[in-house]
Image (tube, rainbow, N blue to C red):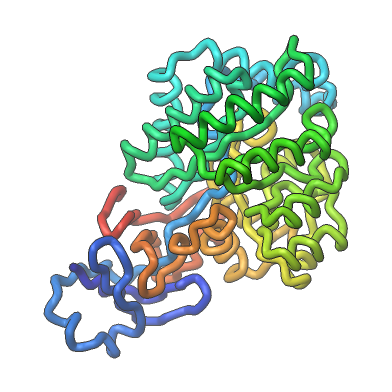
Amino acid sequence: MRVFTGITDLYTPFTRVERAALAVREGRVAWVGPAAQLPEPYRAWPHEDLGGRGVVPGLVDSHTHLIWAGSRLEEYALRARGASYAEILEAGGGIHHTTRATQAASEDELFALAQARARTFLRTGVTTLEVKSGYGLEVTHELKMLRVARRLAEAGPQRVVPTLLAHVIPAGWDRAAYLEVFTTELIPEVAREGLAEAVDVFVDRGAYTLAEAERIWEAALAHGLKVKAHAEQLTRTGAARRVAELGGLSADHLEAATPEDWAALAAHGTVATLLPGATLLLKQPFPDARSIWDAGVTLAVATDHNPGSSPFYNLWLALQLTIALGGLALEEALQAGTANAAQALGHPELGRLEPGSAADFVVVEAPAALEPLYRWGETPIRAVYVGGRRVWG
């Protein structure tokens, strides 16, 4: 039990509380509000003074490919000289390059690499990471990646939400044969071992067709797993609408999505997750975040951290880009990187500071809680707490 005081400015993120106090019991928020109104029962609890600083919920990065080996610096240089992502992928590079390196790496090597990346995110206030497979492709290597994700969750301190990703058809495989293995062997094994909470499908040119994705989603749902999609990124496929109709958690990317797609997401409560890093690096049109938000869609923003199309290590930067290029207000962007992102993972208890929610929060090195959205190129973080316990700073 502990009461945190000395908070000049706190966002829940839905409301702002000035001169706030935060009471935490057994890793969860017991009370939050103006310090002057702290209920009597909490006044005798141990206090921790945060020194006149702002507080926001722990950030939730709801779309990452954190587990990978190798480097795609050369590909990055090729794209800078005009090569397209699709051209590199079709020539055997891109995802296929990372797949070869990831398959060659041991579980211990992948764990060490991913843990180092997770710590980088932790220093910027990310307390929850969604972690996808998808670079293993072969059954044994996909399972290896998901076991690494489980080890990350067990090691902490961040919360990890694992996702099985149907990324591309492996080189040398017959499409129908691979789909059969993925749906009748891999998904059942993942469900049996509890290695993932959801199944994501990359539906686009060079990846999966919508019909193939439907087969994968149906298998996932049949095994008690949730579904989501990489949708409408390079081309419009109808994946956003279809995954929404299936009750999907989220449709991610959405550069080629239409107002009709937004309406489907809003109608079914599926989160639209924007990934500014990939959008900019692949030179795609930036989604109209303002209009998506105003259409009643729950909008999240994530880094899409991966070695190819989005080597992003800072969710604040993704939020800043969505403010500058997508038209969100600062308060909306914070919500997109916290509570809305948690909803995209099916974990509404995260990304917020309300009674009953997880006591994951970030202490900002400034009196104003929104300061990290204002400072480009610097992330002013004093400390990070998970479950009410300081884990960084």
Above-or-below relation of 298 to 159? below
Q: Position of residue 252 (x, y in %)?
A: 70, 48
Above-or-below relation of 78 to 282? above
Above-or-below relation of 57 to 345? below
**Residue 145 visible at all:** yes
Task: Identify which residue is drawn at 33% across, 54% down.
Answer: 386
Quarter of the image holding residue 375?
Answer: bottom right
Q: Nearer the viewer, residue 30 or 57?
A: 30
Q: Nearer the viewer, residue 70 or 74?
A: 70
Tell whether 379 sits left or right of 332: left
**Residue 75 visible at all:** no
Q: Nearer the viewer, residue 80 or 5?
A: 5
Task: Identify which residue is drawn at 80% across, 54% down.
Answer: 241
Q: Quadrant of the N terminus?
A: bottom left
Task: Identify which residue is drawn at 49% across, 57% down.
Answer: 347
Task: Identify which residue is drawn at 69% across, 18% down.
Answer: 96
Q: Position of residue 337 (x, y in %)?
A: 56, 58
